[in-house]
Amino acid sequence: MAEDAAALEPVFGDPQVVRYLGGATADRARLWRATAEWLGHWHLRGYGMWTYVERATGAVVGRGGLWNPEGWPHLEVGWALGRAWWGRGYATEAGRAALDAAWTHLGADWVCSVIHPGNVASQRVAQRLGGRFDHRIELNGTPVDLWRYDRPPG
């Protein structure tokens, strides 16, 4: 687990990456706690966030997947990538895999993405995944937009 936290430090230590994720950069200690939280989610829910690894290089490029801790608005598909990997289609690819898991393994009728209103890049990913803006809420004191994905027919 310590290696996972260290591998994510370049991603979540970048102010440009975290500007829409609460804004605070993460050091190794904070990432260790976050990794423990993500692992706990897997243990309690049976699904959760994945660490994204680039096949060609073996580099850790981000994390994402399915998320629904207590008090969250709904089952969410989310993603976060290191800046060096923006624009390569990785978020869309990983988001599709997570949505497929939500439909196939969890039987979800719908899934959301919680996206900061200013995060145009994530809004574009949500649109490519078939999502649509649903409504705005306040989550942990911050206004966020819920994007909705409905289970495909069939």
Image (tube, rainbow, N blue to C red):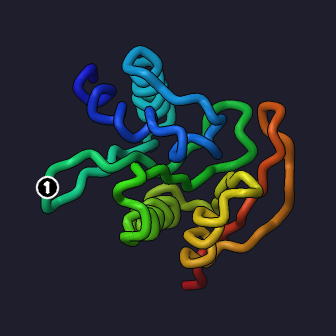
Would you name the residue on which mark 1 appears? Answer: 57
Residue in the picture at 53% in, 46% down = 16
74 or 27, nearer to the observer = 27
Percent position (x, y) of residue 151? 61, 73
105 or 61, nearer to the observer = 61
Q: How many residues crowd mark 1 within 10 Å: few (<14), some (14–19), many (20+)?
A: few
Q: Can you say whether 32 is above or below 82 in the image?
A: above
Residue in the picture at 38% in, 47% down = 62
Task: Kindly give the residue lying farthest to the top in the view shown.
Answer: 29
Percent position (x, y) of residue 134? 81, 66
Q: Quadrant of the C terminus?
A: bottom right
Dot 1: what SS? loop
Q: Is residue 104 visible?
A: no
Q: Quadrant of residue 110?
A: bottom right
Residue in the picture at 32% in, 50% down = 61
Residue in the picture at 40% in, 27% down = 35
Q: Quadrant of the N terminus?
A: top left
> Left of 15 or right of it: where is 134?
right
Instruction: Report the label total.
Output: 1
62 or 35, nearer to the observer = 62
35 or 86, nearer to the observer = 86
Name the amino acid, label 1: Thr
Percent position (x, y) of residue 67? 55, 44
Q: Can you say whether 75 is above or below 38 in the image?
A: below
Percent position (x, y) of residue 142? 81, 38
